[in-house]
Amino acid sequence: MSGAFAALPAIVVTRVRVALMYRTNSIVLGVAALVQILLVNAVWTAAYRSGAGAGAPPLETLLVYVTLAGLHSWLLADSVISDVQDRVVKGTFLFDLVRPVGFLTQMAAQQTGYAASVLLFMLPALPVVLLGGALSPPDGTVAGLAYPLSLGLGFLVHTLISVLIGLSAFWTIKLEGIGYVYRYLSQFMAGAFAPLSMFPGWLAGVADVLPFQAMTYVPVAIYVGELTGNALVEALAVQVGWLVVLILMALVVWRRAVRKVVVQGG
């Protein structure tokens, strides 16, 4: 067991090395993320100047929110969906079944490697974000302590959803369309472009029953002080609840996927 867990850092490092091999692609994605952050900041600034910000959070708070949310979107932009699909199509996942590290654990390590590679390319871009966007320290000590915890939970939720979508390749084979829908839908419903508290009533209600809020809105809202006290505790509890539900779902789907492969193999 200890040997299996010792292999996880190697998987993460390998994924980072792949990103460095294709660093031009990683840089282009990073530039695209920066452009998105700057454009969203510009749109909200123009909207507030035209008087559209009545009853909304102060512009400074909103700009911090959308800037940090944009960085979150960049961090969660890549996923293991294409990896799982590729392994299913080529049949190489069969080798994963006999490895000491479980398939789902491998995918979690792969996703961590994605995030680590993004962080590597994100660091040089932070000065540009600070100049063109807006960032400030967390809203107090509690927010500063709760934010990384919430961010970690949100990352795990994203990883599990990605794994679940990837596992659907055992039935659908191709996932490009589903992957695109997930990426853009999750960004919007996670509050990447505006806090969920600014959504219209019916749309906010939809977002409340989906797990995407746990990925971006909750940690960023904690950071800027929108969620405090009981609301903060409840938000963390929702994140943990989704994490438990998604873990159980992933285990069930994985077992059915393996059973399906055995049946197909005769």
Image (cartoon, helix red, strand yellow):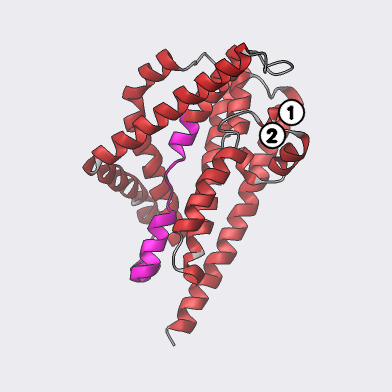
The quadrant of the picture occupied by the N terminus is: bottom left
- Against 47, residue 246 (above or below) is below
Q: Position of residue 25 (x, y in %)?
A: 28, 40
Q: How many marks?
A: 2
Instruction: Tell me which segment is drawn in magenta.
Output: 71-100
Where is the C terminus found, in terms of image quarters? bottom left
Q: Which residue is mark 1?
A: 231
Residue 235, numbered circle: 2
**Secondary structure type for disc 2:** helix
- The residue shown at (38%, 49%) is 110
Local secondary structure at mark 1: helix
Three-letter amino acid code at the position of disc 2: Ala
Give coordinates of residue 252: x percent, y percent.
59, 65
Quadrant location of residue 32?
Answer: top left
- Name the magenta segment's main secondary structure: helix
Expressed as whole percent of the image width and height from the top left, the position of residue 9 reads: 34, 45
Q: Position of residue 37 (x, y in %)?
A: 46, 26
Q: Amino acid at mark 1?
A: Ala
Task: Evaluate if marks 1 and 2 touch, with contact meaning CB atoms under 8 Å apart.
Answer: yes
Left or right of 230, for residue 84: left
Give the label on residue 165, or none. Answer: none
Label 1 to label 2, Cα distance in Å? 6 Å
* Residue ID at (28%, 47%): 14
